[in-house]
Image: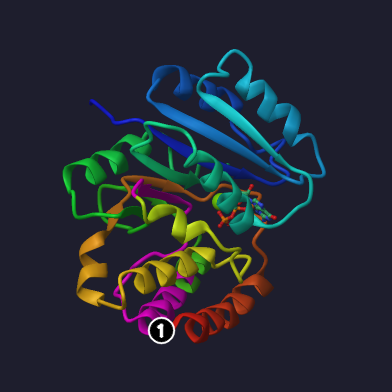
Amino acid sequence: MNVPSGTIVIPCYNEEKRFPLDRFTAFVDANPSIHFLLVNDGSKDRTTDVLQRARAGREHQVDVLDQPVNGGKGEAVRAGILRALQREGCFYVGFWDADMATPLAQIAELAAVLAARPQLAMVFGARVKLLGRNVERRAVRHYLGRIFATVVSTVLRLPIYDTQCGAKLFRVTSDTAGLFAEPFSSRWVFDVEIIARFIRQRRYDMAAVEQAIYEFPLPEWRDVAGSQVRPGDFLRAFFDVLRIYRQYRP
Ligand SMILES: Nc1nc2c(ncn2[C@@H]2O[C@H](COP(=O)(O)OP(=O)(O)O)[C@@H](O)[C@H]2O)c(=O)[nH]1
Ligand SMILES: [Mg+2]
């Protein structure tokens, strides 16, 4: 497949043990058009060493951004995307969770959708458990995720299925930086905030927004142990959505 060039940001917080170094380097070497920006988000373990090893010998394709203070996933992604947008010749930018619950091979699939459909501004991985696919998610997380997505759909007036999947690509246009320009007000549901900003950018024309976002049902996704999201975060997420609603409504 002829994949246009892009940069994927991988936010990493205490990922020394979880970051799949061998899988990552093998993928990088086999996919020269895909650049990576690994963001160390003020980790307390040796994440930096692992990320530097991932970069060694691949400096043209892999960059490491060291954030001295832990700012949370959203801020790590934001810093990374703004940096990635400075590279010339990027057709897309995106972010991907460090546990690689979504296999890296899906980057090309998402990019291909973006390339084939000019009206799209963004493509999100969606964890839909259909027959014939390997989407393994713990039941609790699945149902909590369904409730959360339903709340977000209602609040944003956008029928989105999966807001929280850590695999998202954005077409690089003059509008892209605007989505990441300001710090996010929420630590965990910045994905929702990106969508809220996009809706505002499109002047609340919901038909236009629906035409510009594509959810791609992933053929493979597996829960990776060691998630740092805690039950309390789930509750906090609802209040964050409420705040986003107030902040971004017309
Ligand atoms: N928990 C946490 N994750 C962060 C932070 N900064 C960056 N991340 C990254 O955000 C991603 C979250 O993935 P994970 O913990 O598996 O969450 P889950 O898959 O949604 O349960 C990983 O790539 C983390 O390394 C942070 O401050 N806290
Ligand atoms: Mg995970």
> Is residue 206 placed above or below 43 in the rendered structure?
below
Q: Measured from the top left, where is residue 210 in percent x and y?
A: 24, 68
Residue 162 visible, this angle: yes
What residue is drawn where x is 52% and y is 79%?
Answer: 244
Q: Quarter of the image holding residue 111?
A: top left
Q: How was this image coloured?
A: rainbow
Residue 99 visible, this angle: no
As shown in the figure, which amino acid type bears the numbered disc 1?
Val
Q: Measured from the top left, where is residue 98 in percent x and y?
A: 57, 42
Q: Quarter of the image holding residue 175?
A: bottom left
Q: Secondary structure at mark 1?
A: helix
What residue is drawn where x is 67% and y is 29%?
Answer: 51
What residue is drawn where x is 54% and y is 68%?
Answer: 189
Residue position for label 1: 155
The boundaries of the magenta stretch are: 145-173
41 magenta-colored: no
> Is residue 98 placed above or below 159 in the rendered structure?
above
Q: Quarter of the image holding residue 18?
A: top right
Q: Nearer the viewer, residue 4 or 31?
A: 4
